[in-house]
Amino acid sequence: MGIDKQVIDATERNRQKLEKFEAFNEKVKVGILGGTFDPIHYAHLATAEFIRDKYKLDYMFFIPTGNPPHKLGIRTDKYDRYNMVLLSTASNDRFIALDLEVKRKKSTYTVDTLKDLTEKYPNADLYFITGADAICEVDTWKDTAENFMLATFIAATRPGISLLKAQEKIEQLERKYDTNIISVYVPSLDISSTYIREQLEVGKTVRYLIPENVDIYINKKGLYK
Ligand code: ATP
Ligand code: MG
């Protein structure tokens, strides 16, 4: 099947999953993994699945950023990044891709996304997942205190980021914002989108680091050359 058809099918599959989720009115636990996903890779997917299973979350939302205020120089079209997330999550009934940030015209902030989700899905308990690198920067985000009120933050270990340093930062955040942050060891996969982009730029293989259909999508669209 051609990759364009795969994107169409993944879009339809995602729509069905979201419809089913929205029809469910009882309490649900929803994890959120935000990111630029430039491109999405297996460490994102494995971390999300590990945490979903460990904390018995009913769903995991993957939310690619639109125009992130802190990450300048993203060259990849936001819809390409979103399509790659769609392709990667299609086969997991509990993974849902959301386009609310890519659709936003202005800069996207986590706090706006969390507010939107809380309003739209009052039955959902939100768990915001970050890697150990991202949790260290969380207090530079807009409205940090409000973010902590809207969702429970879960910080996942990430290779290359000292857990001790992250742990210090986590405790400091907990004191400052009077909140609880869950930190969790996830099986290490030393993959980053930066590494994937660098490999692709010099024509090297990224096979087995990203889903096969994402690799095909990248080639077809000529991304990261
Ligand atoms: P880049 O290199 O472009 O920054 P990235 O691999 O860090 O890309 P992002 O889209 O920036 O991917 O990250 C989205 C989220 O996934 C962040 O919370 C990040 O900490 C987390 N994450 C990314 N890679 C890993 C990994 N290998 N292990 C654990 N968490 C990860
Ligand atoms: Mg990153």
Image (cartoon, rainbow, N blue to C red):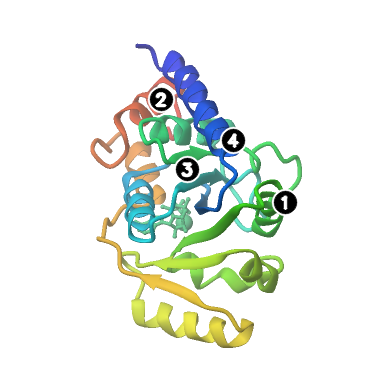
Q: Which residue is mark 4?
A: 23
Whole-percent x, y for residue 154 in the image: 46, 66
Q: Amino acid at mark 4?
A: Ala
Number of residues whose C-alpha sits closer than 10 Å to that of mark 3, classed few (under 14), some (14–19) or many (20 or more): many
Q: What residue is drawn where x is 59% and y is 64%?
A: 151
Q: Is residue 26 left or right of residue 161?
A: right
Q: Which residue is mark 3?
A: 38
Specify which label sits upstream in the sequence, 3 or 2: 3
Q: Which residue is mark 1?
A: 119
Within 8 Å of ligand 1, the CB of disc 3? Answer: yes
Whole-percent x, y for residue 195 in the image: 35, 49
Residue 90 occupies quadrant: top left
Within 8 Å of ligand 1, the CB of disc 1? Answer: no
Specify which label sits upstream in the sequence, 4 or 1: 4
Q: Is residue 13 or residue 23 the one in the foreground?
A: 23
Q: What residue is drawn where x is 65% and y is 56%?
A: 114
Specify which label sits upstream in the sequence, 3 or 4: 4
CA distance for labels 3 and 2? 13 Å
Q: Is residue 200 or residue 134 the one in the foreground?
A: 134
